[in-house]
Amino acid sequence: MEPEELREVDRLLDGVEAEFDGLDSDDALHRATVLAHRLPARVRRALNEFRLERLSGVLIISGHQVDQDRVGPTPRHWRDRTGHSSAHREELLLVLYGSLLGDPFAWTTQQDGRLIHDVIPIKGHENEQLGSSSEALLTWHTEDAFHPLRSDFIGFACLRNPYGAATTIGHVDDLELPGEVREVLTGARFGIRPDESHLPKNNSAPAEEAFEAIERLDRAPDPVPVLFGHPERPYIRADPYFMSVDAADREARAALDALTERMDARMVDMRLEAGDFCFLDNYRVVHGRKPFQARHDGTDRWLKRINLTKDLRKSRAERAARDVRAIG
Ligand SMILES: [Fe+2]
């Protein structure tokens, strides 16, 4: 962002920040969507080009200042946030940018149904396949690959990342897969189980029915294709760590292994810095995170995350009311 554009964003936030108490309500999200039309023209244009797939599957809007004193120490757990968020300003801006791509939504079964997630290392999760892990490689994946209502885009606001922990990115467009492998991957032959962030043990007050649905998907995932859309420029839906194929389907196993190998070789590092707002196209890129050493002293990497959908209606049957944004 150019200095004048950053000043424009600051002026907008200065003028409207106090009008937002929380950001979880239907009314707040409606107002934010309308306010987003007052963001600088060039960033609105870039976000729309990104939405229309005219750009690569990663968009970073950088240059914003994050007042480190105001946001305070990195929390030890996402549950620690009660009441007003110290990063309200960055959360609002994440929602403003995001609303030019889609509508924010939540999962009843993830971070207690919150709309805005904290991505921070949590003590005890070091070696899990979770966003809150640190010492383990977070294997590349499509966000919430197991779910047909997964996000079209995900957005991150980086509040701090002092040791430059690397997010990893892989573009499906970069894969040069032989035609026959590609064809196998477009068949409904692959099971994808939910990742552990959707399990009751990683939520405080589990709503039983929602978790029962997750358990069903965990026990017997419906076979789905990994590649879909246009055969020559396919979209991707994969999370190899949580995937299975029928033991007898050797062709599917070989195709999945070939995809994994090629994607592994193509993953690139992306080190987000404080003030970076990053959007990923969840149909065109996969992402993961390299291992890092967490400090657990209030200075750790801290991202805010939202899920965005192009079409809220698709999830209406799985949301309790029109104005409820949590699925499940
Ligand atoms: Fe993820």
Image: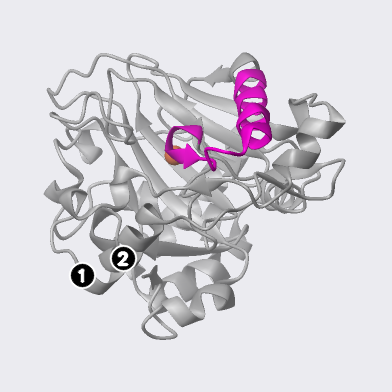
Residue 64 included in the magenta stretch of the image: no
Tell me the kind of residue under disc 2.
Thr
Tell me the kind of residue under disc 1.
Ala
- Give the labeled residue for mark 1: 207
**Label tally:** 2
Q: Is residue 305 above or below residue 120?
A: below
Specify the segment rendered in magenta.
Answer: 240-263
Residue 322, image x, y percentages: 44, 85
Quarter of the image with the N terminus in it: top right
Colouring scheme, one of rainbow, by chain, secondary structure, one colour: one colour
Q: Which mark is residue 108?
A: 2
Q: Residue sitting at 49 percent across and 40 percent down?
A: 244
Q: Which mark is residue 198?
A: none
| Magenta-drawn stretch, dominant element (helix, strand or loop) | helix
Q: Residue sitting at 50 percent across and 33 percent down?
A: 240
Residue 255 included in the magenta stretch of the image: yes
Q: Is residue 316 above or below residue 208?
A: below
Q: Nearer the viewer, residue 140 or 268?
A: 140
Residue 289, image x, y percentages: 43, 25
**Tag 2, which secondary structure?**
loop
**Mark with earlier residue (2, 1):** 2
Q: CA distance from mark 2 to mark 1?
A: 8 Å
Q: Nearer the viewer, residue 184 or 161?
A: 184
Question: Viewed as shown, does residue 196 lie left or right of 54?
Answer: left
Asked if disc 2 and disc 1 are in contact, CB closer than 8 Å, the reply is yes
- Quadrant hosting residue 152: bottom right
Q: Residue sitting at 39 percent across and 49 percent down?
A: 194
- How packed is label 1: few (under 14 Cα within 10 Å), some, or many (20 or more)? some
